[in-house]
Image: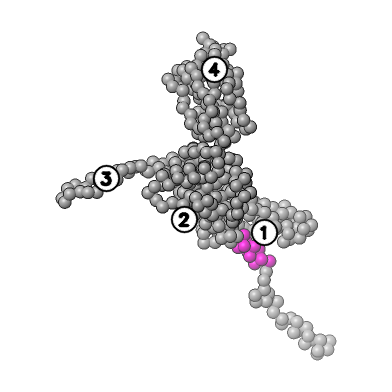
Amino acid sequence: MSEKFRMNIQLFANQNTDPETNLITKSQMARVREVDFVERFTHNILNKLREALGVTRVIPMAEGTTMYVYKTTGTLQDGSVPEGAIIPLSQYERTKTPVGEITLNKWRKAVSAEAIMKSGRDEAIAQTDNKMLTDVQKKVRSDFFSYITGLDGTVIARSTLQGVLAQTWAKLQVLFEDDAIEAVHFMNPVTIADYLETATITTQTAFGMTYIANFLGMGTVLLSSAIPVGQVFSTAKENIILYYLNMTGDVAREFALTTDQTGYIGINSDYATNERAQKETLVMSGIQFLVEYADGVVIGQIDATPGLDSVTVASTAGTAVGDSNIVMSGYTLGTGEKWVYKTGKSAAPAVTYGQKLGTGWTELSSGDDITPAADATKITVAAVDGNGRAQAAGNATLTVKT
């Protein structure tokens, strides 16, 4: 063996086999994708929605904590008190109603080895992570709209969109008369379509929704197909609160989640499950938008003939003992509408236009037999739309078979 050959072998053996400084590794690239996921969700998406809604109160919660809506009533006593006299106490009461617990949402997806071979690693993992991000924000939106459209607030009906917005804006000024408030209105794009045909306005997007700032000078309008067509749900921006579970701390360490200082969402992407030959992504979050004061929500109804229509209700003896046969006339159910009823002991239950008829109301068809409680003497039947809000109603004295 020549001396030159031995020197080359020695030189090769002495070379440093450790990775070079500043080498970008596969794990670092996965971390970059995770950070990008969190940054886009929190700063580019969620914070834009908070800005559009005007949400300034953000409250971290513990898993399983019950959330409440509140109502405060009371009277400020006269402050003109003579020198040395006892200052009268001003009495205030704050009542709360539970609206459910805040819970941890967990999502997981997996990409097979075959999918990676077919589409490539970045396409199979990164692109599906992006789709997952979109679906998570849809879940947050869906939860909020399901909640707010289920509230039984004050209903105001007018024949035009402008009329509805004017009246709901005015009602909010009364409900929050002690505060300088900004209104926010939620509606279906179809509801506003006719107006947009002839108007020049500027729209923006946030959290997958289109919104219009300072619409007609009466607040921000957010558009979503989750809102029933023809209805507008309005409240004060100051009435909306963001509750969330913090994804930092123990949960982040135990599940190797990437998050940021806000802790709104955590992700662990691109970890291997070898027994199934797949790469997985885990996302955790617990976010819920709620209103603080439920009676601070006003529901606008666009109706060519706003008002509760009349229904003629007839009650005759039913087939079985204790049953009553109920027949409705004078009103034809519209698309998506149905009949519901409720009985009363001494008086027929009262119904107002647009009132949400849920608990205690039972669906029926004209000509059905019902079995009312033994002490029931009156019945109210109402036609409700697809969102359970009263469009027509009538009542009768119950007649049962003896």
N-term-proximal mark, 1 vs 2: 2
Which residue matches tag 2? 56
Q: Residues within 10 Å of mark 4 (few under 14, many from 20)?
A: many
Nearest to viewer (mark 1 / mark 4): 4
Nearest to viewer (mark 2 / mark 4): 4
Q: How crowded is mark 2: few (under 14 residues within 10 Å), some or many (20 or more)?
A: some
Q: Would you place residue 43 above or below residue 74 in this image?
A: below
Which residue matches tag 1? 270
State the image coordinates of residue 227 (x, y, percent, origin top left).
Answer: 58, 43
Q: Do the residues labelled 4 and 3 touch (CB within 8 Å)?
A: no
Q: In the image, what residue type sits under mark 3? A: Gln
Dividing the picture into quarters, in which one does residue 264 lie?
Answer: bottom right
Bounds of the magenta segment: 26-38
Choose between 217 and 326: the one closer to the eye: 217
Q: Residue at x 35, y 42 (%)?
A: 73
Choose between 166 and 234: the one closer to the eye: 166
In the image, farthest residue toward the right: 1
N-term-proximal mark, 1 vs 3: 3
